[in-house]
Amino acid sequence: MGTKRVKGKKKLKSIKTKQTDLHGSKRRLVKLGKEQKKGMKGIVANYITRSQAIKKLQITLKDFRRLCILKGIYPRDPKKKASGKATTYYYIKDVMHLAHEPILNKFRDMKTFMKKLKKALGRKEISDARRINEAKPTYPLDHIVKERYPRFQDALADLDDALCLVHLFAVMPSVKGIQSKMTTDCLQLVREWQNYIAASQALTKVFVSIKGLYYQAEIKGQTITWLVPHTFTPTMDKHVDLRVMLTFLEFYQVLLKFVHFQLYTELGVAYPPKIDLQLDAAGVQLAAMKLEKKATADASNGDAAADDDAVHTDEDAVAKQQQDSEARIKSLHVQPEDADDEDAEAEASYGQMTESLTTAFSTLTKDFVGDKADSDDSAKLFSGLRFFLSREVPSACLEFVIRAQGGVVGWDGAGSPYSEKSDLITHHIMDRPHQGHRYFTREYVQPQWVFDSVNNQVLLPLAKYVPGASLPPHLSPFVDDAAEGYVPDYRKQLDKLKSALDATAVGEEADHAASDEAESEDEEDAYVQGLKAEAEGEAVDANSEDDDDNDSTSKKRAAASTSTKPSKKAKREAEQEELHDMAVNMMNKKAKRLYGRMQHGLGKKSDKIKALEEKKKALAAKAKK
């Protein structure tokens, strides 16, 4: 045959191939169709590799990462990977969307700016370098926040990571890459967030762990959980990519400002809240934030705009703010009413307490929130209680938690609403044994009592939380003990306490409702119980002899029945076990494998529970010794 292949020579073309080669390109396209390249058809065509995306956008890898973080675009994991399994893939639609982002041009302007600045510094042209640095390009992120979160509920649902990162950078030291202004801005956002939570009283849970303090709040139906690190200066790990974290922080700062503005506006408070410079210099946290109604703030802003020509320097602005703060403090004085009896002295001392900014804070909060806050204030856990914080306890977290539950906080220092000697203090929080004078008009507790009471929404007994006592376990409110299969003993005690308090409350309401009918019903019940007692006494006397005669026979019958026949419960368990084995044998291979994995997980869970039980027994035995 003509197409037969000869060894050592090139394979000959078939007659059909020869004829096709003679055709033109258009005729060949009509006859055979367009040739598809690899990765250009099917599911693979929806994805693009990272190197291809960078080449298409014509930016560096660093700018591509920043752009993806700001826009909320993440890598994908396609089922079919045309360029290999070790390659990062993105949706091609996401990359095309990035190509039209205005910030992309700002990144290119920044690249040009850095080239000019380095060139001027290399030539030691300091004046030109300063001039170039003053024209440094900036880019806004407002449109990205509105694009990613079209609804306010969406922003609240995605607030957990933003709060955790901002709280972390609020305590970071000023190292390479972290400027002091960045830490100050994060601390300002933290205070604004805590100020709103305390004013709206939305805090529900708090847990102290080795990582920090976990908080949870309920805002507009959204559950928000965030972590606040302890007040120790953290150290930077060299394996952490700080540039990625700073890019996330840059976006989260803008997001939190949007959220704070909306929350404060709905509360009727001007945003951003002003800070009292005197109290802030004294180290006061939440009490230094001045809350103003939005209408008053707008009027003051209008007056300030009218007088803007007279104020030129920053020193004059600071002096004016200090004068306003002093005038505000003087306006908050409450004079006691004149009286001659002992009640007048109590009123006078109460008036002295309300001179501070703390009372103004609670008063303004009630005005802002409105009737809802007035109705819910009595239902808060610490409403009507006044706390004093010793110097050794962590004041920032305790002040935040107590204010969020309706309590009033005092401390040893400037800006405190009352001193340590005040008779209005109900609870003194300290973390050391009693030293010095002890007041018998107040309760002394450790800080854990505040956190445990908030988690259980009950004022717990103080016997286990007195200073110097061995504290009970601090149980996490984020763990469902029933689902885990192990319920600690202290959790059982707390559940019994809460159920007893609920039953007592229900019983008091029922007793109050039935107080008018109690006397007549008691007489009838006593008469009926007397008749029943007489009838039961006669029946017991008549049947006592028959019971003695039948005791021996009944015991013999019971012994015989137990020795010969199995119980109904044992039969039922045997039948269930047999049915279970039959069901397992009837499974196919895939179902058996899945069932085996499930049983393995349950076995690990039971082993964990057994380990906790053994640990509890060991601790109990050690405590007895």
Image (cartoon, rainbow, N blue to C red):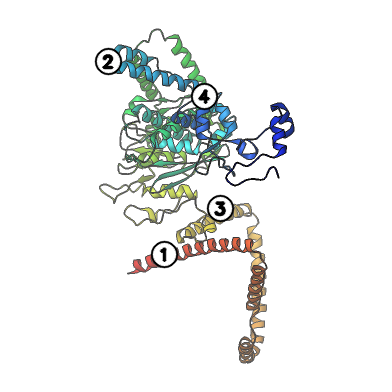
**Between disc 2 and disc 4, whose residue precedes?**
2
Q: How far separated are the C-alphas under marks 3 and 1?
A: 34 Å
- Residue pointed to by mark 1: 616
The numbered mark at residue 124 is 2
Of the two numbered discs 3 and 1 in the rendering, the one whose residue sits closer to the viewer: 1
**Between disc 3 and disc 2, whose residue precedes?**
2
Viewport quadrant of the N terminus: top right
Q: How far separated are the C-alphas under marks 2 and 4?
A: 37 Å
Picture residue at 70% right of the left edge, 35% below the top: 18
Of the two numbered discs 4 and 1 in the rendering, the one whose residue sits closer to the viewer: 4
What's the amino acid at mark 3?
A: Ala
Give percent across and percent down for residue 378.
Answer: 52, 41
Picture residue at 44% right of the left edge, 47% below the top: 207
Q: Residues within 10 Å of mark 3 (few under 14, many from 20)?
A: few
**Between disc 4 and disc 1, whose residue precedes?**
4
**Between disc 1 and disc 2, whose residue precedes?**
2
Could you say whether the residue bearing mark 2 is in a helix, strand or loop?
Answer: loop
- Residue pointed to by mark 3: 505
Give percent across and percent down for residue 140.
Answer: 48, 22
Q: How far separated are the C-alphas under marks 4 and 3?
A: 52 Å
Q: Is residue 33 visible?
A: no
Of the two numbered discs 4 and 3 in the rendering, the one whose residue sits closer to the viewer: 4
